[in-house]
Image (tube, rainbow, N blue to C red):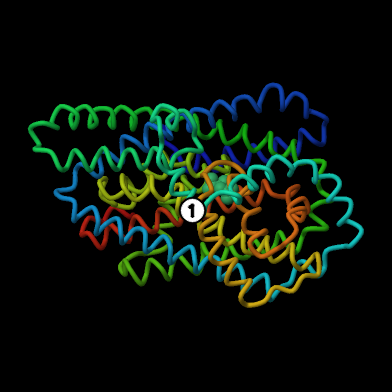
Amino acid sequence: MKKKIPLYVQIIIGMVIGLLWGLIAVQFKLEVFTIMWIKPWGTIFLNLLKLLAVPLIFVSLVKGISGLSNISKLSSMGLKTLALYIVSTVLAISIGLVLVNTIKPGKTFPVEKQSEYLEKFGANISDKQSAADVIREQSPLQFVVDMVPENIFHALTDNSKMLQVILFAILFAISMILLPSKKTEPVKRFIDSLNDIVLKLIDIIMLSAPYGVFALLAALVVDFSGDADLFTALGLYFLTVVLGLFILITVFYPIFLKIFVRKVKYMKFFRAVMPAQMVAFSTSSSAATLPVTMKQVTNEMGVDKDVANFVLPVGVTINMDGTSCYQAIAAVFIAQVFGIDLSIGQQLTIVLTALLASIGSPGVPGGSIVMLIIVLTSVGLPVEGLALILGIDRPLDMLRTVVNVTGDSSVSMIIAKSENQLDIEKLK
Ligand code: ASP
């Protein structure tokens, strides 16, 4: 009898073959073939996942919240979720700050590369800079204003407006709770059925995941092949970010889960979250990974659907531990390169702005770059510094997205445990 290879093993195989193919393509001049014939399959896979992000967020939030018995249950779960998201993000930023101040990667950055990179990548930042200028010139309350859509269809058509969709879904679901159940029954049934359909769609799309990640990674290696030089100059900065993300995954989350969930074997948690991590790595988007995260958290970690339906969609946009850790390191790195000493007060400002910036960053590839400009300017650092790190951002984006997704999954377990809605036996 043919034994079925588990999906996550298939995805790992796809990734490894993708990386190998990329290397072979660079060696044997198959770059054009790879970009013309393989890359599109990766893009198709990515689009399919993105396609599901908005319907999934809307349907799962409405289902999750309207399934709660009353508003006080929602506010208790909501407050707990928010508190955990903020605490984990602040700790992630602190880890980043400690590392970058200890390792000081900016001090070793070769001076001659400084002007070269500023020139090479400087042009790329002007539109990002004007986007950041617009944000900065607005009222401090503008980000709250931006959360409120004036037209739900506009919000639904833009993957970077997830917070607006979330707000609408929450209000919609709250109204459902407040009405007598007889009145909302048809919509409830409709949403339930829609939810099942979306979940089935995810199952179908995930069948193509091994091929999708193969194509994404093969194309990535080819796209990156000319930039080996960047890695040498920025090596220490790269390693500092990787170390920060590694500490989050191997030290921080195990302790976090131990404290709040207790009876959890981290290796089992890790195995369960791995398929989502791999999709996060290949797509650099926590929003695109949401369908997989949702599936893993409910099917393999024993988190109740109602909890996952609430915690994960919210986490996709507002909880980004990997991103915030990286933003802190990047800001101080740029200060070090330009020989600017940051006071304790300025470093605390980085904590605050990186927290807000990670909340404001959409879960899309490179989503945090515009927000990083806000962090830089909050402590008076030159925005041009961004040009130094832009060339090497993609691999770091892949890694921080892995952490972002792991953070959301951990918090969903903790909330489920606190709500008595965790079936730990499922974590095999
Ligand atoms: N790509 C990240 C995510 O989707 C966001 C970022 O750090 O740019 O989670």
> Can see residue 280?
no
* Residue 210 point in image, percent of width and height: 53, 34
Kind of residue indicated by mark 1: Ile
Report the front residue among 109 and 217.
Answer: 109
State the quadrant of the C terminus. Answer: bottom left
Q: Is residue 111 above or below residue 426?
A: below
* Residue 383 point in image, percent of width and height: 73, 54
Q: Is residue 420 above or below residue 142?
A: below
Q: Which residue is mark 1?
A: 359
Report the front residue among 378 and 411.
Answer: 378
Q: Is residue 397 above or below residue 28?
A: below
Report the front residue among 413 and 16.
Answer: 413
- Number of marks in the rendered image: 1
Label 1 CB sits under 8 Å from any ligand 1 atom: no
* Residue 404 point in image, percent of width and height: 50, 53
Under circle 1, the secondary element is helix
Residue occupying the point 73% across, 49% down: 390
* Residue 321 point in image, percent of width and height: 51, 59
Q: Is residue 424 left or right of residue 270?
A: left
Residue occupying the point 74% across, 72% down: 104
Q: Is residue 85 above or below residue 150?
A: below
> Can see residue 296?
yes
